[in-house]
Amino acid sequence: MSLAEPAALPVAAVVSPRSHIVARFSARLKASLPAYLLLLPSLIFLALFTYGAMGRVLIDALYQRATPKAPLRFVGLDNIAAVLADPAFTGAVVNNLIYAVGTAVPSIGLALLFALALARTNAVTSALRAALFLPVLIPMVAASALFLFIFLPNVGLLDYYIGRLLPVVPNWLGDPDIALYAIMIITIWKNAGYYMLFFLAGLQAVPGDVMEAAHLDGAGPYQRLRYIILPELKPTFLFVIVIATLNAVTQVDHVFVMTKGGPSNATNLVLFYIYQQAVEHYDIGMASAATLLTLAALMALTALSFRTMANREGGA
Amino acid sequence: MLFSRRLMLGLAMASAFVFPAMAQGPTEIDLFFPVPVDGKLARDMGTLIKEFNEGHPDIKATAVYTGSYDDTLIKTRASIKAGKPPAAVIMSANFLLDMQIENELTNLDSLIAADGSTKDKFLGQFFPALQGNAVIDRSVYGVPFHNSTPLLYINADKAKEAGLDPSKPPQTWAELTDWAKKLTKREGDKVTQWGIAIPCAYDYCGWMMETLTMTNGGRYYNEEFGGEVYYDTPSMLGALTWWSDLVSKHKVHPPGATPGPAVSTSFISGNAAMMMLSTGSLTYVRENAKFNYKVAFIPRNVRNAVPIGGASLIIPAGVEADKQKAAWTLIKWMTSPEKSAWWSRATGYFAPNMAAYKTPDMVDFLNKNPDAKTAVEQLDVAKPWFATYKTVPVRKNLEDEVMLVLNGKKQAKEALVAAQKAADETLKPYNAETSLKLP
């Protein structure tokens, strides 16, 4: 709700409210019918592959078997309560929060740094941009398989170099205190180049005349960054933060390949927990309940960010 | 136009599903197969199935690659739920019990009887150690296809260097500890060569715990009943304590949990002088080791004993009768002595069919590669692979705790008590329906 909205609307609604509403509704429908028709193809596929699946998850989350051979019965919210009470789930949520913050902040920071350094286009920066973008082109599964060997204790590339400096080389993926951070390094390495693209695009939108004026007024590089570039990049930041957070929940390929959530659940993320419930425990009820909780969190996050973006657009 | 043609095609396909009897020609069956070791196996499987189809014009088998053992279970379950299961699957041998409990397997007894054979005669072809994972409630549910046991691999060059005789490998835990100490090289506090490495990642870790517990005289689980595991026992306590002693007391084993590929790479690169790993890695070591190596039985503390690993052929529940018959023909062909021997030579797994070792090609092969013989000899002391209700979560209950111990974050006793408690909780629904369901 914007403050600028006219306050005169209630007056018109006094005369015969019902017929008025029906007329308005049908008129509106008529006007937007072509739009709905145009949306129909994608709506059909969304219904088949997205909303249909979500509906199924909603139903599955409400059923459970008491013992292996017992029939499925309706249990209401019991599955959700059981998921919330499962220490493995809360552990996965905590891991996921650390993972989200620990990957989003450094990769966005690096991306901004790269973009600022490589904003001007010439042969050198183009080559460097391509080099920084390269990790994005490597599929996560392939990258994880590579890093599996980079992280190998004693014989991997990392230990080959770092091992000479440290007295005791850590078991990167085998120590529950370190494994999550090792996983995070891959995500940062992989995503920073991707986010750099958005910042490069954002930097193109910084008005040249404003920059020039600031330059003439004697604003130094730091002042230009602080008072012109960063404020202009705000929408880009918002967008990238949302993408980075969604990635932190939905990209778990490297967990599958490298640690399977271990050691001792140290790298267990929410999506992997769902996989474990569905596949290892073969407990569709619990898996569906955990999926619902995750979906709810993601939807809330998306709605919040869209609202923030819409407010900004409206304000501008 | 396009639509109508598609429609016709769709109708034709639909009718082929609905009226399979009307379709003339061979019975078409799918075989789901995982590749647990490396990509080369997929090609070997293609060769095998092509040969089968050429020899059986009335059956057309298609081999469908389904990823890892775990992925194969997921895909099989998904297709059973979708009502269109594959006719046969190569399934990790310790998933069979869980699938049987969930009513997802076809009982093979009637197919054996239809051949005029008996259960004992049929199972008699295979090594006795493999039968435990194929038989559930006295009915046959799986046919052993390729199997493994854990082995002790020794870098013979390094052993000689350390003044040890690789032709007399360590036979007891005491000797192994001694060897590992002599084979560990240090520069100050830093270890440059580890005496021994034992893998611990989900799946491998549980198998190694079963191995160590068995050589310590114990059992991992109740072989007769899927509702019990024996984690909080003296034999497992001894096993885990010794393993963690190798890490933190003797400092001859790399700390933390190390997955299988890391252990084999470490061994190949000379960073670990000994390792315990599956016989399934034998071909990999043979092809990659640039030094002389030696394989030996897993050393004992109380007795020599090892679990088996590997996979069995199964027929999922809900396969139509004619496809069942075709699948059974395929399964019998794949597990026959000649094919079993060929697959064993291609993969490094041992052949479950005992007669395979009497085929001339196999006799030749063993003479050339005596290390492959050790794996077969160890079968005399092998026992089934743990399989319980919800095998994977129950195994993970133990593995999570073992990983903490290997990282020095928990004491063995405390860890095993926690593992037992968690496993009992996981097994509770099954016990509620079986052992604790009282009149």
Image: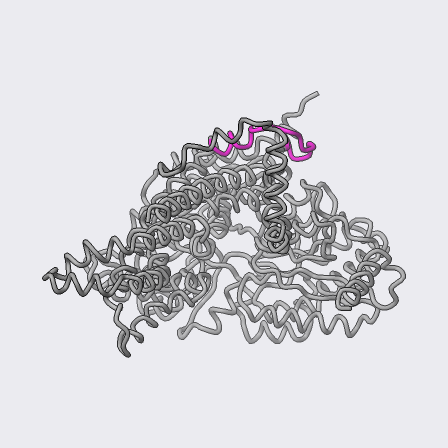
Q: State whether residue B334 is above or below residue B239.
A: below
Which residue is at a point 40% across and 46% down the rendered structure image? A310
Query: Among all residues in the image, which is located at the extreme top?
Result: B439
Q: Which residues are magenta?
A: A65-84
Which quarter of the image is occupied by the N terminus of chain A?
top left
In terms of depth relative to the viewer, which is nearer, B198 or A90?
A90
In terms of depth relative to the viewer, which is nearer, A175 or B286?
A175
| Percent x, y of residue A288 | 56, 40
Q: Is residue B430 left or right of residue B8?
A: left
Query: Among all residues in the image, which is located at the extreme bottom?
Result: A123
| Percent x, y of residue B52 | 75, 70
Quarter of the image holding residue B364? bottom right
| Percent x, y of residue B422 | 48, 34
Q: State whether residue B114 is above or below residue A295.
A: below
Which residue is at a point 19% across and 54% down the rendered structure image? A227
Q: Is A82 inside the magenta-drawn segment?
A: yes
Which residue is at a point 75% across and 68% down the rendered structure image? B2
Q: Is residue B179 left or right of residue B82?
A: left
- The answer to whether one can see residue B253 in this image is no
Q: State whether residue A151 is above or below residue A266.
A: below
